[in-house]
Amino acid sequence: METLIVIPTYNERENLGDIVPKVLALDPGISVLVVDDNSPDGTGDIAEELAASTGRVHVLHRAGKMGLGSAYRAGFRWALEATDAQYIFEMDADFSHDPSFVPEMLEIAKSGDADLVVGSRYLAGANVVNWPIRRLILSYTANVYARVITGLPLRDSTGGFKCFRRKVLEAIDLGSVRSDGYGFQIEMNYHSWKAGFRIHEVPIVFVDRHSGTSKMHRRIIYEAFGLVWKLRFQSLCRRGRHGRTDRAA
């Protein structure tokens, strides 16, 4: 396979059977990995049916609900160990990430102009549909906050619609990325940027989920707000160590 799209699931039975065929129809070189956290609603069974009927769907079953960041780390490891995919996507199962944006993101990654392509909700205003105003303000503020504290040159560092070139994931120590939710997205972007990889944002329209229940909760939000300071301090410490080494030399 050339391109693998990693889709984490927990109780996404109503969405998975619709979104996977739409993704596969985009390009015959695209395959899908469903990382299911033992969904009580039988999402894992739907994934297995899709795998059997298409030959381009793979399923990673996990013992229970362990978080979005953990699911993506498992999916990325699987992609690197079990495939030769050169382009690896993150995508939600609930249609908040429209598959129609995949070809543009993939084209940019293939062009060699970017190593990480980020689908951005805030590159051209605020392209978010059906969100309560409080959640929109929180999300937008979190992105401004992350940009100011870390220096990360992104308008949308918390979004989860991305395309990594394989070499980016190979270069990042996934075991050191421990955050979840918003924090996971910030951390992956930050480590990619600090490693010298080129990041390109593409404007997308984010539409709140078609069916099911949001997995967002306060712990994920608090974790993200604390994480940006952790990343900032780590960067300052590394800079300080390098400065002392240079002076000693």
Image (cartoon, helix red, strand yellow):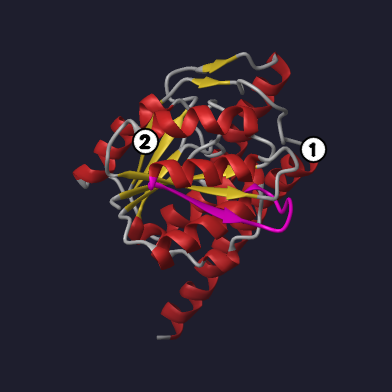
Q: Nearer the viewer, residue 22 or 90?
A: 22
Q: Is residue 225 visible?
A: yes
Q: Is residue 155 visible?
A: no
Q: What element does badge 2 sit on?
A: helix
Is residue 64 magenta-colored? yes
Q: Residue 13 appears in which quarter of the rendering?
A: top right
Q: Which residues are magenta?
A: 55-68
Residue hosting label 2: 24
Amino acid type at mark 1: Arg
Q: Which mark is residue 49?
A: none
* x and y, in percent, of residue 90 in the image: 48, 43
Extreme residue in the bottom direction? 249
**Does 189 sit left or right of 36 as displayed?**
left
Amino acid type at mark 2: Leu
* x and y, in percent, of residue 119 in the image: 43, 33
Vertical order, 38 against 125 (above or below): below
Q: Residue 83 appears in which quarter of the rendering?
A: bottom left
Vertical order, 35 against 16 (above or below): below
Marks 1 and 2, how far apart at CA: 34 Å
Q: Residue at x 49, y 25 (%)?
A: 121
Q: How many numbered dots are placed on residues in this image?
A: 2
Q: Residue at x 64, y 40 (%)?
A: 43
Q: What element does badge 1 sit on?
A: helix
Residue hosting label 1: 218
Mark 1 vs 2, N-terminal side: 2
* x and y, in percent, of residue 31 in the image: 37, 46
Q: Residue 246 appears in which quarter of the rendering?
A: bottom left
Q: Nearer the viewer, mark 1 or mark 2?
A: 2
Is residue 32 magenta-colored? no
